Image: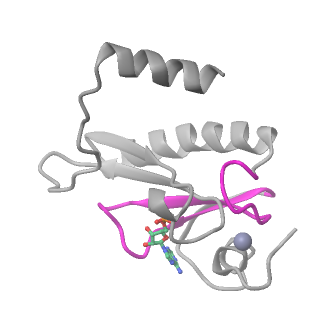
Amino acid sequence: MRDENCIFCKIANGEIPSKTIYEDEEFRAILDLGPAAKGHALILPKDHFANLFELPEEKAASVMKLAKKLGAQMKENLKADGFNLVQNNGECAGQTVFHFHLHLIPRYENDGQKIGWKPGAPSQEELEETCKQIVG
Ligand code: AMP
Ligand code: ZN
């Protein structure tokens, strides 16, 4: 279940060294090489799934449990003031490595980072229409 051409498969399985903060049978968590803030880490499944939609339900549940555990540990030990979880799917959503990963981003007062979006201003009718589209 690994992809020969995938760098995160190699990192997750220890073929390429990384700054590992956690490892078990299913996952490895590593420090991001281009951190948004000190401690920015990525949880990688050891098997290859391109994105959230390929990730089996049980692993999706496990990854969130692990995020909670590591997040609490990082918040405590790094004295972070807040925390973001970010998970990008698809190029237009900012995904650059096509092996599922969950970003764990400790945040600090005045860290100068901004993770967000430009808010839209839909009418009630537009919101209603979107609801219908999603629900089907
Ligand atoms: P995304 O844009 O959600 O696909 O995130 C990819 C993340 O992987 C970025 O934050 C990169 O800084 C990080 N990254 C890419 N290559 C490596 C690597 N070899 N080791 C650690 N982090 C990496
Ligand atoms: Zn992979």
Residue found at x 46% / y 56%: 93
Residue found at x 75% / y 74%: 13
Left or right placement of residue 2 versus residue 9 in this view: right
Q: Is residue 51 magenta?
A: yes
Left or right placement of residue 11 versus residue 84 in this view: right
Extreme residue toward the left, this view: 110
Up/down of 124 relative to 73, above or below:
above
Left or right placement of residue 77 versus residue 65 in this view: left
Region in magenta: 25-54
Residue found at x 37% / y 74%: 34
Left or right placement of residue 125 versus residue 81 in this view: right
Q: Is residue 117 magenta?
A: no
Picture coordinates of residue 92 (x, y %)?
Answer: 46, 60
Quarter of the image for residue 25 reads bottom right
Picture coordinates of residue 75 (x, y %)?
Answer: 37, 43
Quarter of the image for residue 68 reads top right
Q: Quadrant of ligand 2?
A: bottom right
Picture coordinates of residue 74 (x, y %)?
Answer: 42, 48
Overall secondary structure of the magenta stretch?
loop
Q: Nearer the viewer, residue 35 or 2?
A: 2
Q: Nearer the viewer, residue 72 or 82?
A: 82
Q: In which quadrant is the N terminus drawn? A: bottom right
Residue found at x 38% / y 49%: 77
Extreme residue toward the right, this view: 1
